[in-house]
Amino acid sequence: MSEQLYAGLLRLYPAGHPRDEMLDVLLTAGRPVWREIPALVLGGLRARCGGEYRWLYAARAAALLLLIFSALSSARQVASGWLPLSTMQILVFAGATLAVGSIIAGLRVPAVLAAVTTFVIGAADAADWRAVTGYSLAAVLLLIPGPRTPVHNPLLPVLALVPVDAVALGAEPLLLLGVLILVWAVVDERVALAVGLAFCVAFLQVIGDLTGNDARGLFLLAVTRLGFVTAFLLVGGLAAQRRSRV
Amino acid sequence: MREPTYFILAALQDEPAHGYAIMSRVASLSNERVRLATGTLYQALDRLTREALIEVVREEVVNGRARRHYALTPGGLSALQAEAARMASAARVVLRPLGGLA
């Protein structure tokens, strides 16, 4: 019975992991099943997610979030008729798509070139939304040098969809999603770090959009947004620090 | 260095061992204080192999299942000895001979 249960749980681990050997240890040790299961599940999920280059991966994942979000926001404005579907706009979409594909594949130089192109075309095309151009620039800055680090996580593109229509989703589901991301830091803290970095860029962009002496607006932003930025970066950072210890 | 890591490295200081032997030695060396779950042990072995503190030195098949033997690398031995010296130095501050208190 426990052999079947353990064999099933060991499927959580990626191929190439010593599943056979682990099953042997589990059966030889003969400990209570409830004592083995939590560490077995956590270990399997962590092994699936991988955990190398935590901050580097998070920075690239944040760039991915910003590029997808900016392209989707532009597309939404085009669809609603606020922006014309100009040749420049099509080039912005193409650049963002290329940059996203390159980040996922771990191709940093093509990703930087595509993100720079997206930013330059977006900035030249004055009709574009300010934040979109700002996000492309932030994405370029986040694609910092380092070893090849593909960003394979199906969760990230889904997360990038959330802020496109955050108001329609409502506060409670958003809060729940935020809590889930923070809890997921036990398995993979890089998602929380990526969301924190992307939030940080969004926060700076909104501050940039405030009028000169709008102290009330700044206070409200600090209270409502800074808490989220801090929570994601703090939880993600602490989890990353803990996991980097031998 | 985390306590489980310290005892895993200590379990390998005399000779290579396979997963279950490491688990048993860790429990014994720590007076049953550190009792690793299998998932925790293999997360640690994976991390220590990546950090080049331990390495797989032999593989065999027992009861139809693969079994790998792990050993300390020179880097792992240095890290273990450095940690032991650090803890001994810290312990001396508290556990000094009574005459030293005057």
Image: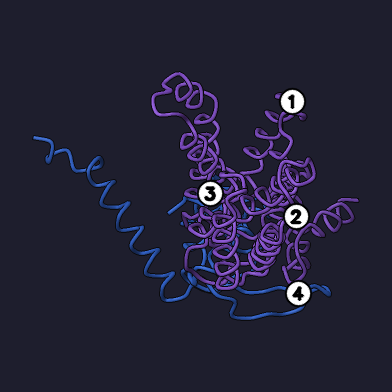
Chain colours: A purple, B blue
Q: Are marks 2 and 3 on the same chain?
A: yes
Q: Which residue is mark 3?
A: A134
Q: Which residue is mark 1?
A: A170
Upstream in the sequence, badge 2 or badge 1?
2
The alpha-carbon separation of the residues under discs 4 and 2 comes to: 33 Å
B32 versus A124 height, above or below: above
Q: Secondary structure at mark 1?
A: loop
- The answer, for residue A41, to whether it is visible in the render is no
The residue shown at (62%, 44%) is A186
Mark 1 or 4: the one toward you? 1
As rendered, which of A6 and A136 lies closer to the eye? A136
Mark 4 or 2: the one toward you? 2
Mark drawn on residue A190: none
Q: Amino acid at mark 3?
A: Gly
Q: Which residue is mark 2?
A: A154
Upstream in the sequence, badge 3 or badge 1?
3
Labelled pair 3, 1 in contact (Cβ < 8 Å): no
Q: Secondary structure at mark 2?
A: loop
Local packing at callout 3 (Cα closer than 10 Å; few below 14, some 14-19, many 20+) is many
Query: In the picture, residue A171 is in which quadrant?
Result: top right
Local packing at callout 2 (Cα closer than 10 Å; few below 14, some 14-19, many 20+) is few
Upstream in the sequence, badge 2 or badge 3?
3
Mark 2 or 1: the one toward you? 1
Mark 2 or 3: the one toward you? 3
- The answer, for residue A160, to whether it is visible in the render is yes
Mark 3 or 1: the one toward you? 3
Local packing at callout 1 (Cα closer than 10 Å; few below 14, some 14-19, many 20+) is few
The residue shown at (55%, 32%) is A228
Q: Does residue B1 appear to the left or right of A101 in the view shown?
A: left
